[in-house]
Image (cartoon, grey):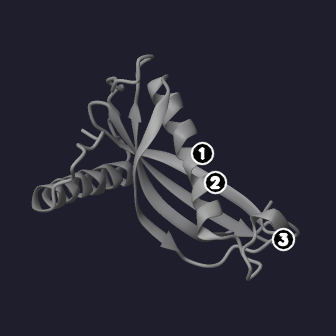
Amino acid sequence: MAAPMDANVRGRVGAGRMLEWIDKSPYACAAAWSGHYCVTAYVGNVRFHQPLHVGDLVEVQARLIHTGTSSMHVSARVRSGNPRTGELNLTTECTMVLVGLDNNGHKRAVPPWVPTLSEDVALDTHAQKMVEIRARLLRAIPLEVPPLVD
């Protein structure tokens, strides 16, 4: 439930609060999949479809869509709506990449995820294309610090 303390000056839940909520659900998904502590390495493709208001019921869902050697791509979706009707509409969605870490804070291998349903195969293919696009961007505009994602 979106509370008054979640609101910005317009009475809506702000993007920062929304991303805070989103970060928790993919973390739980990635930690459950890997069995280890994970950190967020990338947040992208954020789309805000409609405002989320104080008093709205809020549901955040996370779904594993691709694994690398130590990384897990997770799709996050936020739905919200009036708690009296129970009808929830898509509010926000994004893709996050989390990296599994060992007890010393180093990258750790994660179990591979093999999609079986056609929708999962499509999501995995999309995630792989995004990996390629991010790699091309890094080659074109190198970062001073190497990314965690493999």
- Residue furthest to the bottom in view is 10
Q: Are marks 2 and 1 in contact (CB under 8 Å)?
A: yes
CA separation, marks 3 and 2? 23 Å
Residue, x 81% and y 63% (percent of image)?
5
Q: Disc 2 marks which residue?
A: 21
Q: Disc 1 marks which residue?
A: 24
Q: Is residue 7 left or right of residue 73?
A: right
**Residue type at tag 2:** Trp
User: Which image quadrant is residue 106 in?
Assistant: top left
User: Which image quadrant is residue 4 in?
Assistant: bottom right
Where residue 140 appears, x then y in whole percent? Answer: 11, 62
**Residue type at tag 1:** Lys
**Residue type at tag 3:** Thr
Which residue is at the front of the view, 19 or 95? Answer: 19
Q: Disc 3 marks which residue?
A: 85
Residue, x 48% and y 23% (percent of image)?
36
Instruction: Give neighbour class at mark 1: few <14, some 14-19, many 20+ (Cα, 10 Å).
Output: some
- Secondary-structure class at tag 2: helix
Q: Is residue 83 left or right of residue 65?
A: right
